[in-house]
Image (cartoon, rainbow, N blue to C red):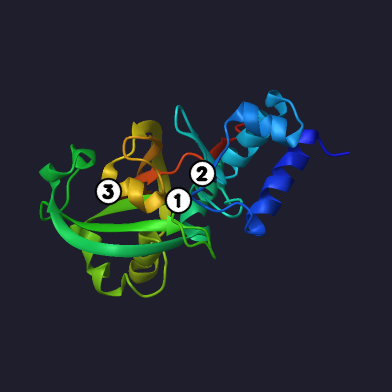
Amino acid sequence: MKNLYSQVCEDILGQIRAGELRVGERLPPEAEYAATLGISRSTLRMAFAELEEAGVLKRRKRAGTEIISDRPQRRFSMATSGVAELLSLGRDTEFSITSTRQVPTEEIPQLAGLSSETGHWLEVSGSRRMQGESRAFSVNRVYVPARFAAIEPVLHEGRRSVFQTIEETFDVRIGRVAQSVRAVACPAEDAKVIGLEPGAPALRIEAQLYLSDERLMEVSVATFHPERFQVHNDVKIK
């Protein structure tokens, strides 16, 4: 048998699909809505939590519960036990480029202590989405040292990641990935793209990709919607 709150989730989704509830509409206060449905407030809260996790509802203090999608949003899950898994994000999702430009090392904080042959880097800005999805779940800025900047003319061919284009163009392969994950307040320019409020909590992943000979291939700075992306680590100690 299904849990009662799971059934409530299905009922709410059914009403949204039928047009009885619409995206942008706010649901009644919890006490009132629970009484209307004939369930306890705790059951309703569990249903709301599950629908918020699925990207259907958004709950805000003093603002109520808003319907933000007419269907559950898929989440990209990145399992990391080796380099191949770390790169799955770039290989298994679509990357759409919005702009490219040349930037000096000193302009970008994440490039401090790193070097490019000319002192400038190719900055590639874009967003990443699951295949078949219209809403991006991350905003990405990739910095390519001058040695690989010749990829710029072919970057817009397909929706490959920058590192894939470098690998194919120069016949090289990634040998090491170093990355860090932290919580940030979502910048306003990124918030609109991934569907967050400016300043809302977001995930920031900063990564450095190296060739097997330890030459730097790229530096990546990405802001993720925290409810549509997760990282799973499973490391065995021998």
Q: Earlier in the sequence, mark 1 or mark 3?
A: 1
The answer to whether residue 141 is above or below residue 158 is above
In the rendered image, which quarter is residue 150 located in? bottom left
The answer to whether residue 10 is above or below residue 185 is below
**Disc 1 on helix, strand or loop?**
loop
Residue 78 lies, in percent from the top left, at 55, 45
Q: Tell me how far mark 1 sits from mark 2, CA to CA.
A: 7 Å
Label 2 near label 1: C-beta < 8 Å? Answer: yes
In the rendered image, which quarter is residue 39 located in? top right
Figure quadrant of the C terminus:
top right
Give the residue pinned by disc 3: 189
Label 2 near label 3: C-beta < 8 Å? Answer: no
- Mark 3: give few (<14), some (14-19) or many (20+) Cα within 10 Å: few
Question: Which three-letter amino acid code belongs to the residue tagged 2?
Answer: Phe
Q: Tell me how far mark 1 sits from mark 3, CA to CA.
A: 14 Å
Question: Which three-letter amino acid code belongs to the residue tagged 3?
Answer: Glu
Give the residue pinned by disc 1: 137
Per the rendering, the mark at residue 229 is 2
> Residue at the location (38% across, 64% down)?
96
- In depth, the one of 158 and 130 nearer the eye is 130
Residue 210 lies, in percent from the top left, at 35, 49
